[in-house]
Image (tube, grey):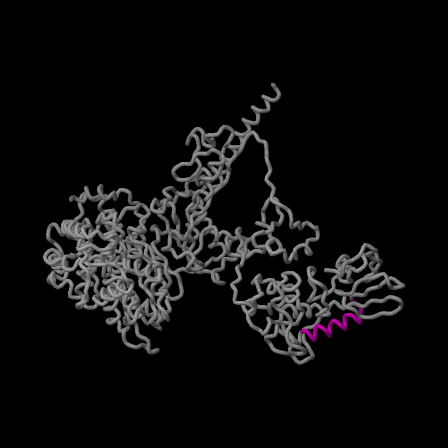
Amino acid sequence: MSMTPTDTKIPVTIDGQSIEVEEGTTILEAAQRLNIPIPTLCHHPALEAYGACRLCTVEITYNGRSRLVTACNYPIRAASLTEIEVQTASEKVLKGRKMLAELLLARCPNATAVQEIAASMGVTETRFESGSEDELCYLCGLCVRTCEELIGQSAISFVGRGVDREVGTPFLKFSDACIACGACAFVCPTGAIKLEDITDKEPRPLLSEFDMGIAKRGNIYIPFPQAVPKIPVIDREHCLHATLGRCGACEYFCEADAIEYDQKDELIDLDVDSVIVATGYDLIDPHTKPEYGYGVYPEVMTGIEFERLSSASGPTMGKILVNGKEPKDVVFIKCVGSRDPHTGVPYCSRFCCMYTAKHAHLVRDKIPDANITIFYMDVRAFGKGYEEFYDRVKHERVVYRRGEPSEIYRRNGRVVVLAEDTLLGKPIEIEADLVVLATAVVPRADAAETAALMGLEMSPDGFFQEQHPKFRPVDTPVDDVFMAGCCQGPKDIPDTVAQAKAAASSALITLARREREISDG
Amino acid sequence: MKTKTMTEELELFGCIQCGKCTGGCPVSRKTVLNIRSMIYNMLVEPELDVNAHEELWDCTSCFTCVERCPKDVQPAELIINLRGQLVESGRIPETIGTALMGVFRQGNPSGVAREDRTAWINGTEIKAAQAGCELLYFVCCTASYDQRVQPVARALVRAFQAAGLDFGTLGTEESCCGSGVRRMGEVGLFEMLAEENGELIRSTGAGRVVTTSPHCFNTFKKEYGLDEIDILHYTQLVAELIDQGKLELTNEVNKKVTYHDPCFLGKQNQVFDEPRSIIQAIPGVELVEMDRNRERSLCCEGGGGRMWAEGTNLEERLAFQRVHEAADTGAEILAVACPFCLLTLEDAVKVEGLDEADQDGRTLKVLDIMELVDMALGDE
């Protein structure tokens, strides 16, 4: 946040490059526009300049005099007789910065952010006596300023004087004012601020929907890497600007000035000749099978969670880690909820057999010495090339054992999968580091609403009913409304694409007929 | 009944041999009982020789197989039917025969005189339900006759009195509920008991029946056809009384307590929260959970008539394993809500020496939830 620049343009030269900036622009901002790097440990674009770390020291010359100033809070003004000349890397500047880096390093010898910036100046050791090994705070005040300026709570401030100065709450007691938003901890460069020191309120981390809750996300985020359009959205339910009118930090970072807080969702009326319903599916809540201990044991996850865990674009960059470690014994359980009238899912979910085989293949690829067991009731590898893939996975030392596991519990720190190997005819226990549940495909929770809205029928399983199972597979009771994909029933990608093309071509018939009517008419 | 007809009547053809029944069966791990394979035999062999399957008596009727079967095949009901064949031909273990005879003659499996059924009361005035009451307290044979369980019934009475309930019992006219009788295959005797007890219960005009035992509770609810009457296990009623402020637990019980879910209350009737809410309402108590809890609770092996029969593997008792699981939580008290769990687990604690102080000076004691409530209610 600059010191309210005016429209008057002032010329300035930085490291020999000239630029005209609005009066009041700081040297740091001007340098950033020229892509000239100036180190800093206390500057934040959304906060008032503070000048705490002083690493942004530069040498300025005007009216024939030169001196050292901090670039972050030095505004360029028109008052001088000659144009201001800035040197960001003069001998004097570098010498001064090295001294500052040594002093910071002496205060916080183990703070990574300090070590890194010092190292970039060639400073790895300090001549001064180091303070506490545990000290991570170098009093940049980013947390204090964020809490005051952006969040408006002033739950923390500097307390004590001189060498006793530190960041804390009033009387160092849990703060009532704190709203546990966590902005202070987020903005702290060294991890010195811990929310649990400030408040006993429980922070509620926002979990990424796309990463199935195994990673966190911010209040402003791009939903997923392939999102169309690939632009960020603001979570209005949690964004502090949307809910309390505070913060607004993202606006200061967006170079394209694209942030518009008062943008509204728009309902658009479209006049169309045909509609294709392709609303997809949900997965059954694995808690409906309490015997598997989902939600109790972190080692037990669903297939789609494993999908994110093993994805190269996922939160672990594709490294399969459970409790921070690479699993050695991996168990897959198929038909979790599927083919199970007892839980209200009488049908086969149709694609779990193949994705489980793929998951086993991924585990083998990433963890060559893993012991991989797949528990199955029947293996349904019915598509083109599917049986061959099943064969291939088996040759990759994946053991298929027939029997639906009945329970998971913990013994000696590991989870144990209990099943009957029905081919051996005896109960077995397998200790595992990771258990992946292939959970049943179920109709979307809002399927009935969609059906009512569109005039669709639902089959007893809760999916949308096609007009004829063989001859009108994408047709609905409403003319010119077609459907495709898992909203009609579980299906794999090739079947979904085939159905989508059928729906599209059915829609084209409608459109062609209409075109004809128009030209005839 | 021929096994062939049984296959059709129990709809065994729906079985897909997934093995979830045997996989979850607590006794399959220690005996040769394999209900999945038995169903397969029923499907493919013309006749099943029940005499060759001594392990049929090992089943505890915990119904884990029934709860988990994806196809609703009800494997445990097959066992009950096959036992029925053995009962019909008189080929049953002696101890079970004695228990059934006791029920037939005196209305209780111990065969103790019917007149002594109310001895547990210790002189307290309790209304005869036959004279009419709002709440009928069905005591259960075990709580009536077994000295270890009698205090549970007395604690319940004290709690009902403290809450000012209009309740009564059937006195010496109460007979065994027949839950264990049916599960041991003696369906005829069960039907007789159900008719007698059912009529008696209806005659009291009580709108609610509360039981000490989850076994009576389960059979009243599912096998008696008492649909017009509200059947409650005591944990449900006591939790309700505490919730409504009618029962005030004032005395501190400074103990670490873990709770064992009885199969007939938890797995079979999904009563998981009420027992826990009672325990947590007791001042000073810290409730800790065993790893296997709620739907994954391990059967104590004392229910479903197994109180009367040892089964084929005496060495590895599930109760032994269970009490160690309880001790591993660091709890000093293993709370239960079922007379059979109380007796079975208490025996196991003694056999395994967990009632003697360990190196940290800790002991494990088995108590019914009502005994804890009684401590918290204090002397009134």
Quadrant where the N terminus of chain A sits is: bottom right
The answer to whether residue A173 is magenta is no
The tally of labels here is 0
In this orientation, does residue B311 appear? no
Residue at the extreme top: A520
Which quadrant does the C terminus of chain A fall into? top right
Q: Nearer the viewer, residue B294 or A167?
A: A167
Residue B331 drawn at (x, y percent): 34, 70
Q: Nearer the viewer, residue A429 or A467?
A: A467
State the residue in front, B231 or B48. Answer: B231
Q: Work out which residue is located at the far bottom of the displayed protein and give it.
A: A129
Location of residue B125 in the rendering, given as x and y in whole percent from the top left corner: 19, 65
**Seen in the image, is A150 located left or right of residue B17?**
right
Taking the image as shown, residue B223 lies to the left or right of residue A413, namely left
Is residue A485 shown to the viewer in this render?
yes
Q: In which quarter of the image is residue B345?
A: bottom left
Q: Is residue A443 above or below residue B334?
A: above
The dominant secondary structure in magenta is: helix
Q: Nearer the viewer, residue A296 or B208?
A: B208
Q: Give the range drawn in magenta.
A: A89-104
| Percent x, y of residue A486 | 47, 40
Q: Residue at x 66, y 49 (%)?
A: A260
Picture coordinates of residue A519, whole percent (x, y)? 62, 21
